[in-house]
Image (cartoon, helix red, strand yellow):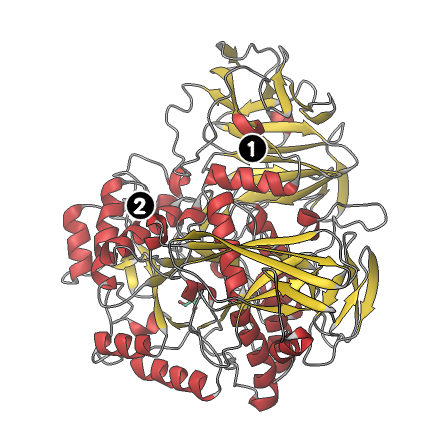
Amino acid sequence: MYFHKYPIDANFDFVKQCKPGQWATLGPTRFRVRLTEFKDDVYRVRVESPRWPKAHSQAGLTPPPVRKKAGSGEARSRLSIDHGCGIRLVDHGGRVILQSQSRQTIGLCGDASVFMFQREACHQFYGMGEKSTGFEHSGRRTKFWNADVWADFHAAQYRDGAPDPMYVSIPYLIVKRGNTYVGLLLDNPHAAFMDTAASVSIAGQMTLKDKTSACFSLGAEQGQPDLYIIYGPSLAELTQKLQKLVGCTPLPPAWALGYHQCRWGYASAKDLDGLDAKFRDHKIPCDGLWLDIDYMDGYRVFTVSRKHFPNPKAALSRLRAHGRRVVPILDPGVKYERGYEVYEDGHRADIFCRNPQGREFIGLVWPGKTVFPDFSTREGRDWWTKQVARFAEAGIYGAWLDMNDPSTGYVDNMQMLFDKGRAPHEAFHNQYALGMAMASREGFEKAHPGQRPFLLSRSGSTGIGRYAALWTGDNFSNYHHLKNSIACSLNLALSGVPFNGPDIGGFGGDTTPELLTAWMKAGFLFPFCRNHSCVGTRQQEPWAFGPGVMKILRRYIRLRYVLRPYLYNLFVAQEERGEAILRPLFYDFADTKGLPLGKIQDQFMVGSAIMQAPLLEEGQTSREVALPGRGAWYSLMEGKWIKGNRRIKVMPEPGQTPVFLREGTIIPAASNQEGSNAFDGRRVVFHVLMNRSSRGVAETTYVFDDGETLAYQQGKRSRMQVRARVRQGRLEITTRLTEKGFGACEPTFVAYDAFTQIVVNGQQQRYFPFLSVCCRQFSLP
Ligand code: MIG
C-alpha cells in the first residue's frame, strides 16, 4: 500500500449521462446511480455495478427513515442529480450549498472510484477522523488505511512530523461554508482517499497545478462507491446527525471517566499494589490501573503470568476494594504454537485468517509467530467473544485493544486473507479493529451481564465508537505532539468518535516536568484521560518529578473528579442525542468576521459550558485567548468575570491554566473529594454561572444513576431540571425532579457573584457559599 501516491482524475472516466436508477455503461463497467433521501436532510448516493457484487462494510450505518415525498415535509434542503450526473444540494432558500464538479461528478477507473465537488474560496475542511496533520484540512491529500505508525514510518516522521495515515480510517469530510456545514461520509471500508489540494509537488522540487478548476474529491481504490451527504446546517446538528448514522457512543461506566495510570512495564500484582498505595498516599484519585503486555505468560493472549500474578483473582478483588479497576491489554495476534490452548482451540474452529495458499497466515509480533482471528466472520467473532468472556470472568471489566491495525510486525499483511481466503485483505483491513471491538464488547457483556464494559482501541473505522473509545496511538513526549493532540481529538470528536484522548505526557521519549504539567493542564478534561509511557523512557507518574510538580498534577486530576458529573452528563447527552463532548469553538458559537473561529485549534470547549485555552509552547508564559459569543466568561484562574466577544491576553501563574466558564450555564459537579474517586450522583453541587447583570434563564437537566450498570435502561435513573435567573440583584433558582427512577438528590449551589439574595425554590437561603466554595475547589491546595 502506497501512502503517498494517489489516483488522478485524468485516469478516470466520468459518468456523463445518467438517469438516477437506470442502468448505463461506462467503458467496461455497467452501473447505475441511486439516490436515497432520508429524513433529517441525510442523502445517499451510491453506484451499483456487478463490479462490486458485495458490500463489505461492517459500519452498520443506521440512517433515518426514508423521506416519503422528495423534498417534502420538514426538509430544510434538497439534493438533486441531473441528467449529466451533476449533484447539487440547495437549502430551503434556494442557496446552493454544495455542487459537484461540472461533468466530473462520479469517476471510475478500474476498481477505483471518485466523487468530485466544486470548491469555493470560503470552504474550510474538517473531520477526516484521526489525522495528526492539523485541524483545518485545506490543501491536503490523504489516505484512509489503518497504519501501525511506528512500524510503517521512520522515527523522524512520527517523532517530529505528522505521519499519515494513522491507526484509524474514517473517510468523513466536513465542508464548512461560513456558518453552514455539510458532511460527506464514504461508506467504503477499502483504502480511501481525499484531496482538498489544488497543486502537487513533483519530488518535492516543483509545484504543479494539477487541476483546471478548484475542486475537492473523495474516493476509494476499490469497493462500491457509496456516499452519504448530510446537511447540518449547523455543526452541532451535523454532528448529531452523523452520530445517529454511525451510532452514538454507549454510556461508559463512571470509572472510565476517571483518571487512568498506565505504562509499558507495569506487569505484576506487586506493581499494581505499589501504584494503588502511591495514589492513596498522595491523595490523588485514580480509577484505572493498566497492564501492558508483560502481564502475560510469554505474550500469549488470554494468559496471565503466574510469576507476576500468583493469584490473579485475589489481586483484582483487593484492588477493586480500593476503588481501582485493572485494564489489561489484549493483542489480536495468537501465538502460533502447538499445545497452547487458545491457538489449538482457534485452529480446531478454523477461525484464523488464511494466506493465499489456504494455510493460516503467519505474522511476527511479540510472541514470535502469530496467527490472527478472522473478525470479518460471525464464527471468528464468536470465538473471540468466548475467549474474552472466559478471561473477563476473573474480575475484569474493561480491556485495551492494541495492535489491531492489524499489526503483523514486518510481515506484509496484504497476504492476510479473510473469510476462509475468499475475501481480499483490502476489504477488511480497515475494519479489523472494528470486528475485534464488536467481539470483545460482547465478551464483556457475557461475562458481566448488566454491567457497562469499557474498551479502548488503537485502531478503528466508521462505527468504532459504538464499541470502543480510542486513544490516539503512540505519540511522543514533545510540544509538537502536545499541540497536535488537541486538533486530532477535536477532529475525531466531529467524526463520530467522541470518546478519545492522547497518551498524556507523551508515549515515546523522555517527558519533562514542564511538558507533563502542560499536557495534564491541557488534557485533564478530555473525554479519555490516561497517562501512558513507553518502556525505557523516564517514569512519568504524577509523583515522578517531586512534590512541586505532583501538587499541580494532582490539582487537575482532582478537578477532573470534581467535574466528573458534568463529563458524565455530556456522555449521557452523547448517548441520547449524539452531542459532541470535546468541541471546536465554532460548534457552540458563530464564526464572525470580527472573531474568526475557523482556524482556532489551541482552544476548545468541553461541552457547552467550559472553555480551555492551554499554553502549548515550551517556556510560554502568556497567550491570547478568543472569548467567543455575546455573553461573559468566568475566568477560573483569575476568579472574575470577563466580557466576551473579544480577544484578551492571559498570563497564568505556573500552577494555573486558562479555563473559562460560560455565562448562562449550570455545571453539575461533585463535592471536593480530595483523593477519593467515589462516584455519587446524588450529592451534586450545581455551579450557577450567572452574575448580577446576567439576563435570561440558565438551565440544565442533570441526569444521575448508579454510574456502572445498565439498570438506567430499565428506568433506574433520575433527572433534575435546574433553572436560574437573576432579578434585581437576586439569584432565583428552581429545581424539579422530572424523573425519579434513581431517587432524589441533595443539591447544593455555588453562586458566582455577590447577589443580594439567593432564593431556591422560593426559599431564601440564609447561608450561601458564594465564591468561597469554588475558590476552595478550584485553587491550589
Ligand atoms: O509496538 O504493548 O500503542 O501503547 O504500550 C508496541 C506495548 C506495542 C503499542 C501501543 C502502546 C503499548 C505498546 N504497543
One can see residue 171 in this view? no
- Picture coordinates of residue 501, whole percent (x, y): 53, 61
Against 710, residue 656 (above or below) is below
- In the image shown, does 19 or 294 lie closer to the viewer? 19
Residue 312 as seen in the image, left or right of residue 742: left
- In the image, residue 19 sits, relative to residue 551, either above or below, namely above
Which residue was labeled with disc 2?
Answer: 375
Residue type indicated by callout 1:
Gly
Q: What residue sits right under mark 1 in the picture?
A: 219
Q: Amino acid at mark 2?
A: Phe
Q: Is residue 667 above or below residue 216?
A: below
What label sits on residue 400 in the rendered view? none
State ligand 1's quadrant. Answer: bottom left
Q: Is residue 7 left or right of residue 625?
A: left
Compared to residue 713, the image places residue 687 above or below, namely: below
As drawn, the residue found furthest toward the right would be 594
Q: Residues within 10 Å of mark 2 (few under 14, many from 20)?
A: many
- When asked about the image quadrant of residue 773, the answer is bottom right
Q: Position of residue 509 (x, y in %)?
A: 55, 74
Q: Tell me the residue at 37%/53% (across/down).
A: 712
Q: CA distance from mark 1 to mark 2?
A: 25 Å
Secondary structure under tag 2 reads loop
Examine the rendering and report whether any part of residue 687 can be seen.
Answer: yes
Q: Where is residue 458 shown, x and y percent of the image? A: 45, 57
At numbered mark 1, what does the secondary structure look like: helix, strand or loop? strand
Q: Residue at x 76, y 58 (%)?
A: 694
Q: Residue at x 19, y 57 (%)?
A: 343
Q: Quadrant of the C terminus?
A: bottom right
Label 1 crowd (10 A; few <14 / some 14-19 / many >=20): many
